[in-house]
Amino acid sequence: MSFLQFGALVLLGIPVLASDPAYLARMEKFRAAREADLKAEGGWLSVAGLFWLKEGTNRLGSAKGSEVELPAGAAPAALGVLNLRGGVATFEPSRGAAVTLDGQPLRARVTLRPDGKGQQPSEIGTGRLKLTLIKRGERLGLRLWDGESELRRKFAGTRWYPVDPAWRLEARFEPAAGGSTFSAETLAGTKETYESAGFAVFSKGGKQYRLEAARSGGRLWFLFRDGTSGKTTYKGARQMYTPVPTDGRLTLDFNEAINLPCAYNPWTICPLPPPQNRLTLAIEAGELDYRPH
């Protein structure tokens, strides 16, 4: 926290909690990087639409009535046709339309890759717009990216609880048996399955709590809801990452709890926390709910 930020908080009557200066500097850097990621071109604020595909023919373009209707003035009236047959999506550009696939000019029919399974999805481009194929459950859809989206242009910034070292909690880690998984419903009505790493067990206010973690590369990922959800923090859930413990202990720093993309963008699809990660504890730390105005 800079001196100017400190003074502003005091003038506003917001409590400033004492902590190690190096820790406060690290948290200031963490929060600045978090906001920069959201605002970056290609960040979650650039998502400008989501179109679930129907079996058969799906027309892409700015013409009214297109199944995938793109912003007028940013795309040709007819960009191309996507055919969905038995879970396989092929795209054929319209004659004369300026279309790219993964950054290269596209002039012939091509089969598209959806996201997932460790692969990058196919990316259809035209002008400033990009479309990527996503798969959720058995549904396929096109996600629209626009660097000039209204959400990105009018972004009001992130909000946070004051940094509080009391929410930096030591936890015991209970590893899961190999092959363990857990499932989470999504806002799209689908279900996602994650590889369970185990449980972090921690205490607060004389009570013990447990959170199940999923493996995310070389880190642990915690998806949770708590007593602040829908009040001061995003109603769906928040998330937090930690290093994988090597000695059965880990630190849960809830000052680093952040919102899911759905807190900022209605065109994103977010998971909901499983029942075991819905806490009654009010975790008054980390990122607050978004206020666009």
Image (cartoon, rainbow, N blue to C red):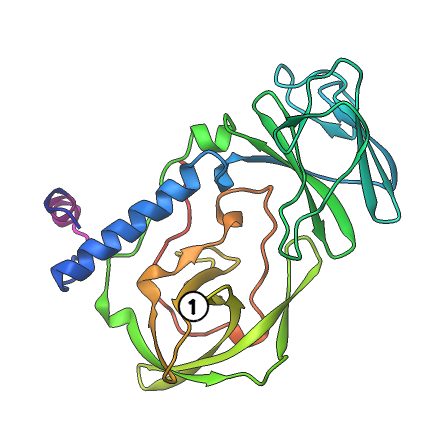
Q: Kindly identify the residue that appears in the image at 34 percent across and 66 percent down.
A: 254
The residue that label 1 is drawn on is: 227
Q: Residue at x 73, y 16 (%)?
A: 97
Instruction: Please tell me which residue lies in front, 269 or 124.
Output: 124
Give left or right: position of 266 versus 208.
Answer: right
Most common SS among magenta residues? helix
Location of residue 283 in the rendering, given as x and y in whole percent from the top left corner:
36, 67
Q: Is residue 12 magenta?
A: yes
Q: Nearer the viewer, residue 166 or 36?
A: 36
Q: Nearer the viewer, residue 126 or 286?
A: 126
Quadrant of the image occupied by residue 74: top right
Whether residue 284 can be seen here: no
Q: Where is residue 95 drawn, in percent x and y?
A: 80, 15
Seen in the image, is 162 located left or right of residue 219? Answer: left
**In the image: residue 99, left or right of residue 9:** right
Screen quadrant of the C terminus: top left
Task: Quadrant for residue 272, please give it.
Answer: bottom right
Query: Which range is magenta?
Result: 5-14
| SS under mark 1 | loop
x, y percent for residue 120: 62, 46
Is 180 left, or right, of 65 in this rendering? Answer: left
Using the image, determine if residue 291 lies above or below residue 24.
above
Relative to residue 129, is residue 186 depicted above or below?
below
Q: Amino acid at mark 1?
A: Gly
